[in-house]
Each structure stands twice: as C-alpha cells, then as structure tokens.
Image (cartoon, rainbow, N blue to C red):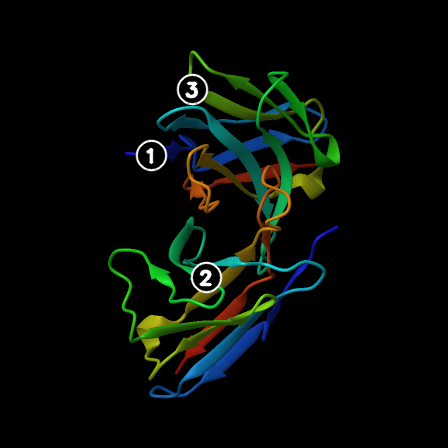
Amino acid sequence: GAVVSQHPSWVICKSGTSVKIECRSLDFQATTMFWYRQFPKQSLMLMATSNEGSKATYEQGVEKDKFLINHASLTLSTLTVTSAHPEDSSFYICSARDPRKSNQPQHFGDGTRLSIL
Amino acid sequence: AQSVAQPEDQVNVAEGNPLTVKCTYSVSGNPYLFWYVQYPNRGLQFLLKYITGDNLVKGSYGFEAEFNKSQTSFHLKKPSALVSDSALYFCAVTPLYNQGGKLIFGQGTELSVKP
C-alpha cells in the first residue's frame, strides 16, 4: 500500500537552531501534503497544506515565517522550523493522499519528535 | 462550523470484552468518516472509513464502525478487545465538497485494555 516516510524521527537541538523535517511519498505522487503538530495525548492540529509547485496554505494562527514549507517535487515536502525555541518542541506529523484515489484516506508519516533545549 | 467530538478522553476495557469508542460529527453535507489509531511516538494508522453504502463498516484488526446519520455518529467497535489494542484512537471527517482532503480530527480517545 501507499507509504509516507518522514525524517528524522527524533531531533534534539539548541535554541536558535533551524530544523528541517522531510516528508516523502514513497510509491505515489502527492500533489498535496499536510503538516500537523501534536502535543502529548492531544489531537493533531493542522498547521498547513503543502501544495506542489505553489505556496503552502497556512491555518489561522500559524506563523508562516516560523514554519517554512517547501513542496518542490511531487514526492517531497519539507517543513523548516526556523530559529526554534523550547516552545516549538512538539511532535510533528505529515500526511499525504494519493490524488488518483479520491476516496482513499490520507497516509501518515511516523512523525518527528522535536526537542529544543 | 465543521467539528468532530470524541466525548471520552479514556476508555478502559477488560481483555475479551467488547469495546466502543464514541464519535459524533457536525459537517455540512455528507461526510467522509475515518478512524485512525496511534501508538506511542508513531504516526497515525488507518483503521477504516465510511464513504457511502452499508452503514456498518469493517476495518483492520477486527474493528468495525457504524455510521448513524440521524445521530451523526460513527462509533468504533470491536467484539473482543486485546491488550495490544491499547492506543490512542482518532475519529476524523472530510466534508465531501472539500476536494483538498483536509481532515478534521476529534480530540482522541485513549483506549486501555487490561488483561
């Protein structure tokens, strides 16, 4: 079945560092990918919709300059947390849907645990 | 406004007993409904979906869910729970008119199955 790969799975870095997270669709081309943020034992909060070849669509309250999204190819979207601070520590999850299958569900990556010291 | 509600933060069940995880939704038009499961430090795994047709949907790992339009509910069920079913469960909905596929998630229900 369809697989979405997310890398890295765990990042620990110092405050002020920028961190890039990659999301790849492995056996289908994803024109749209989604980025979520999740706090412990809470629901997923949609941050933005990543569109191949165009600008991402951000949800209300999400800082575009803080969370840079690039969807340069049909199989790769990246989320860069710029100048990360401890409050950015969270679990970030991406998902993608095979556009050929309109009734099929989104497939999720395994998430990235980001810890900012 | 579109929304999904999972009224129980936690459900505790003894192994071998039936389990139910509740979900109600509010969307305009007919929805696509989904259940996902999340294990610790992992992404979400798809369990089952309702698009149209039979109200009773069967999915992975012996789970099933019943779509009830009049009650706007989509409760997840399993006849006999396993300890390995312990995880965080999310109900989600996509309004039909939303071609972008954006999912609206419930707040999640933690299922704990004790031996």
Question: Measured along the vertical axis of the image, is residue A95 above or below residue A71?
Answer: above
Pointer 3 residue: B72
Q: Amino acid at mark 3?
A: Thr
Pointer 2 residue: A51
> Of A64 and A32, which appears nearest the observer?
A32
Calculate the distance from the C-alpha at mark 1 to the C-alpha at mark 3. Answer: 12 Å
Give the percent coordinates (x, y) of residue B82: 72, 35
> Disc 3 on helix, strand or loop?
loop
Give the percent coordinates (x, y) of residue B21: 53, 29
> Disc 2 on helix, strand or loop?
strand
> Disc 1 on helix, strand or loop?
loop
> Of A50 and B26, which appears nearest the observer?
A50
Pointer 1 residue: B2
Q: Amino acid at mark 1?
A: Gln
Name the residue at 35% across, 81% down.
A82
Q: Quadrant of residue A56?
A: bottom left
Give the percent coordinates (x, y) of residue A67: 36, 72
